[in-house]
Amino acid sequence: MARITLHDVAMEAGVSDSTVSRALRGLDKVDEGTREKVKDVAKKLRFSFSRNASSLASGKTMRVALLFSDALNTWFDSSVLQGAYEVLSPAGYDIIPSTVSTHQQLDSFLDRLPFDGNVDGVIVSSINLDEKQTGILKKLTIPVVGLDSRTIDGFDASVLLDDDKAMDDAVGLLKNLGHSRIAFVGWPVPGDFRFSTMLRAEAFVRAAKRLGFDDKLVGHVELGKMSDYRTLDDALSVAAAQLLASVPRPTAVCVEADAFAVPLMAELKRFGVRIPEDMSVIGFDDTDVAAAVNMTTVHQNPLGMSRLAARKILTLMQDETPDDPHSVLKPMLMLRQTTGPARE
């Protein structure tokens, strides 16, 4: 899709290119009626003049928006922020982090972007966009890079993790250890988005089918939204209860994220479940706490992923195309002491 230019705005508004430039930059010699008309047309076309800085005396904004769907102090998001800073700051760019937890907040962010955001590019981290939001991205006149987004649609470039390979490796390990009754455990969603981590359950089911597991012996513990529970401990109790009440009970589980897998193991042990003798557990992320408790998990590197995404957006902001616009990175299964042979 062709990018909207300053001239397109001028033609739609029925004014000159220079009038559009002055109106959007807030300069004098433009009457307010014309200025508002130009702004309305620019908003309708989703035109952001930062992409066309060469035609404006003000130049680039030297700012990149980094959009998150969770708190910035989580293991993944803080790593993403650090990686982007390491690449963009030496290049002279400031990072503008923003968080959204609802579709309404995300829609508001995208609607404001050409004006209030006033940035040269956007990195969207771990948010799965709906069709409307993807359509908005396609019309933006600034580059947008998806990080752990699970799709390339609407993004000029992206960095994804190969979840199918991750689950092939994890489920393959369980099969080789003799497990036939397995389950995937999700964790409560903090907002109303469909997060990229939630797609791991689908990859788990696909892997089980490819490896010949009986569908009736492949379980899935879904916990809904975090707002359904008073505390995380309540959600952990529900997850443990569902696993213990399953008939037949799984002898091995894959958990959506280490942050939920570690306390879930503690909850299971509280009810007398020996790990891995009674139930093997595999996490996902390979956070520091996973290594501390010697938990088998899938390793990913959000710091490295973010550096790569930042390098891609730097290239795009220079009106060049990255050598590999859409990168799919391979995860690594870290074998530790929470997986073992299936009990008889």
Image (cartoon, helix red, strand yellow):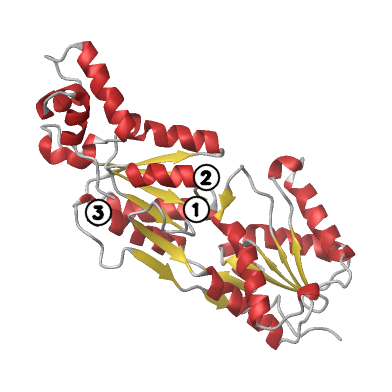
Q: Is residue 233 left or right of residue 99?
A: right
Name the residue type under label 2.
Ser
Q: Is residue 254 above or below residue 103?
A: below
Give me the residue at 72% from left, 49% from top: 224
Question: Which labelled disc corresponds to residue 69?
Answer: 2
Say whether residue 309 is visible: yes
Between 340 and 315, the residue placed more toward the observer is 315
Q: Earlier in the sequence, mark 1 or mark 3?
A: 1
Left or right: 158 in relation to 264: left
Q: Secondary structure under badge 2?
A: loop
Dot 3 alpha-carbon crowd within 10 angstroms: few under 14, some 14 to 19, many 20 or more? many
Badge 3 is on which residue?
316
**Residue 252 appears in which quarter of the rendering?**
bottom right
Q: Is residue 128 above or below residue 106?
A: below
Amino acid carrying label 1: it is: Ser
Contact check, label 1 and label 2, Cβ < 8 Å: yes
- Residue 303 or residue 106, whichever sits in front: 106
- Residue at screen point 70% across, 81% down: 174
Q: How many marks?
A: 3
Q: What's the residue at 51%, 39% (across, down)?
A: 100
